[in-house]
Image (tube, coloured by chain):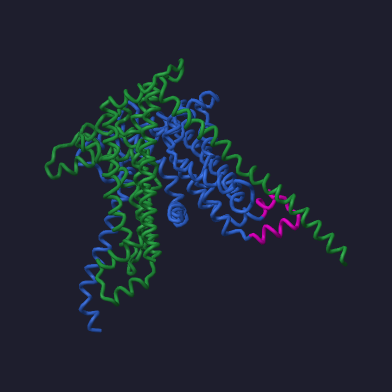
């Protein structure tokens, strides 16, 4: 009897020792594909970009050291600054009204009395399932320069002359922002709706008993409770806006004009149309820096608001 | 009783605003699809007139035949399908395997490595675009679908998602019991973990499939031969064609959009919750 338990214990400890080892080996093995692939197609290219930003290279010939010249070149290029300006302006035009409308739609979809809720949800979400390329092609033709374009013929009803969208400072931006708005508004509506549905009804009931008006409920219950969802959509909208590329490329049909060129489109044109890999890498570094600034800013804001809430609680 | 009668007109106007807003939003969402279909059925001389046609015309077949003369539509669709299925299947396997390791296995440096994976999510893909292109060309993978599939298997979000799910969905006791029965760790993953996380597979699968199917910048850069084009790259080529035949261009765009829309309509609940769940939960 005694010897039996001893044997059992002995086997158990020996087993768990080898178990730990087996666990480690399997663990490392299971996560290794990510790290191997990331080293080749993620980390190395990233570091190489920083290296390349200081060299002159056309992708084929020799690389020659160029110091900070690549940065000087792009910083002296008015089109580079224009691309940053366009990115910010188009981003704001495509995101800010979109989030406001998404909030209103989510509020409507969350209404207790609403029927056909899922039909509305599906209709509003459908643009998101469409590819950006398809959206961009479709909207380029809707915003066609000629008088037969859908938008121009609509404006024609009010006696407005046809707008040459691709050559108009604001026309180009409005067209591109419209693509972003249309594709994303339903997505953000569903995010806000999920947030609203997570708010307990008791809160509203209590507020109603206390005599709170609808706008007070909105201001003191809905908005504060939705904060994490708002922060998420703002964050994703910001990062997404900084990377706008497909819409202008398709809209200008390859001929990227200054009215709507974005930073990523500027980078793409430099690298893959002109073979200036050095300056394109410098642009990539600047873009990376901008995105990092916004990411850190957002993390700080999120943390701060999170802490504020914790203190209150 | 008295209260409700007083409130009735107010309630009605509220309802009117509610439905008005949603019907308007629904129309704005759906009208471009309808108009795309109308244009795909019209000859160019109808498209070029004001006011624009708002009802379907007779050229449905002609326009699509013209598309086939311009790009290899079905070849591109097949390429898109191959790439999307391969990346989705591969990512589901690799992400769940890594997620399982991070959730249930103990090894040195586990938490640090997991944080590292989360940090990689913050790097914008454009940063390494040029060197990655160079690596792909050195490997001889330009115009080869491998150029999309292999780098596409890197999915930090997928690992994060799977780890969170496995942590909650698979009880430790179950794994311990299998271990005592002498199951190897991979057998535990295969026989116990995977059946328990089928919903997570569905969610992540929809997200990855959609992303790969709709991806544009990277395929545009590396898929140079027409025979290797995915649908998105082929559509761009169609849009760039010299003749501005809008009926043809929108015919190609419409038929490229239809398959995913049908799948979406059939599984709309799963699609909507999957595509937004990732956002809501993290």
Vertical comparison of A16 with A72: above or below: below
Whole-percent x, y for residue A280 in the image: 38, 26
Is B274 positioned to the left or the right of A157 in the image? Answer: right
Q: Which residue is drawn at 28% across and 49% down?
A: A96
Q: Image point 26% across, 50% down: which residue?
A: A97
Q: Is residue A190 visible?
A: no
In the current view of this chain or complex, which residue is farthest to the left?
A: A159
Percent x, y of residue A180: 32, 44
Q: Along the line of sight, which residue is nearer the eye, A90 or A152?
A: A90
Query: Which of the two residues, B241 or A273, is positioned nearer the viewer here?
Result: A273
Residue A153 lies in what quarter of the image? top left
Task: Look at chain A in the picture and name its colour.
Answer: green
What range of the chain is rendered magenta? Answer: B172-191
Q: Quadrant of the C terminus of chain A?
A: bottom left
Q: Residue at x 66, y 51 (%)?
A: B190
Furthest toward the front, the residue is A311
């Amino acid at each position: 009897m005694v010897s039996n338990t001893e044997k059992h214990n002995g086997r158990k400890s020996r087993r768990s020792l080898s178990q730990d080892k087996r666990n480690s080996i399997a663990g490392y093995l299971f996560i290794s594909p990510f790290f191997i692939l990331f080293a080749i197609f993620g980390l190395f290219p990233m570091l190489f970009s920083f290296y390349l930003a200081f060299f002159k290279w056309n992708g084929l010939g020799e690389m020659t050291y160029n110091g900070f010249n690549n940065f000087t070149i792009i910083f002296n290029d008015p089109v580079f600054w224009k691309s940053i300006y366009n990115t910010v302006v188009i981003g704001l035009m495509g995101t800010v009204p979109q989030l406001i409308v998404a909030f209103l739609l989510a509020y409507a979809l969350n209404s207790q009395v609403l029927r056909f809720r899922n039909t509305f949800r599906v209709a509003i979400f459908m643009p998101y399932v469409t590819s950006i390329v398809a959206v961009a092609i479709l909207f380029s033709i809707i915003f066609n320069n000629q008088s037969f374009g859908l938008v121009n013929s609509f404006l024609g009803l009010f006696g407005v002359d046809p707008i040459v969208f691709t050559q108009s400072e604001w026309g180009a931006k409005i067209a591109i922002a419209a693509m972003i708005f249309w594709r994303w508004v339903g997505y953000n509506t569903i995010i806000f709706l999920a947030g609203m549905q997570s708010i307990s009804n008791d809160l509203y009931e209590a507020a109603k008993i206390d005599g709170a008006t609808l706008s007070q409920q909105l201001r003191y219950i809905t908005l504060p409770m939705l904060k994490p969802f708002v922060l998420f959509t703002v964050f994703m909208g910001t990062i997404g806006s900084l990377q706008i590329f497909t819409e202008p490329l398709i809209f200008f049909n390859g001929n990227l004009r200054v009215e709507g060129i974005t930073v990523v489109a500027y980078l793409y044109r430099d690298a893959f149309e002109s073979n200036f890999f050095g300056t394109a890498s410098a642009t990539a570094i600047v873009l990376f820096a901008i995105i990092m600034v916004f990411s850190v800013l957002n993390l700080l804001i999120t943390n701060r608001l999170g802490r504020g809430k914790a203190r209150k609680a | 009783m008295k209260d409700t009668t007083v409130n009735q007109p107010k309630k009605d106007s509220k309802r009117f605003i509610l439905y008005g807003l949603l019907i308007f939003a629904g129309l704005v969402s759906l009208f471009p699809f309808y108009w795309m279909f109308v244009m795909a059925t019209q000859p160019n001389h109808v498209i070029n007139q004001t006011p624009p046609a708002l009802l379907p015309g007779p050229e449905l077949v002609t326009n699509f035949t013209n598309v086939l003369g311009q790009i290899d539509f079905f070849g591109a669709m097949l390429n898109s399908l191959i790439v999307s299925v391969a990346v989705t299947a591969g990512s589901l396997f690799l992400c769940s395997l890594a997620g399982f390791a991070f959730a249930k296995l103990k090894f040195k440096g586990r938490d640090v490595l997991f944080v590292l994976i989360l940090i990689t999510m913050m790097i914008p893909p454009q940063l390494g675009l040029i060197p990655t292109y160079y690596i792909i060309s050195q490997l001889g993978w330009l115009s080869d679908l491998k150029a999309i599939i292999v780098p596409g298997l890197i999915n930090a979000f997928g690992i994060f998602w799977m780890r969170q799910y496995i942590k909650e969905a698979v009880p430790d006791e179950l794994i311990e019991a299998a271990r005592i029965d002498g199951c190897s760790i991979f057998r535990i993953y295969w026989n116990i973990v995977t059946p328990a996380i089928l919903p997570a597979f569905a969610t992540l699968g929809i997200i990855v499939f959609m992303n790969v199917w709709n991806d544009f910048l990277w395929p545009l850069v590396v898929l140079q031969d027409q025979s290797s084009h995915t649908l998105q790259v082929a559509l761009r080529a169609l849009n760039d064609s010299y003749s501005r035949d809008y009926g043809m261009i929108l015919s190609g765009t419409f038929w490229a959009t239809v398959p995913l829309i049908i799948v979406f309509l059939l599984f709309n609940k799963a699609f909507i919750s999957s595509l937004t769940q990732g956002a809501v939960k993290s």
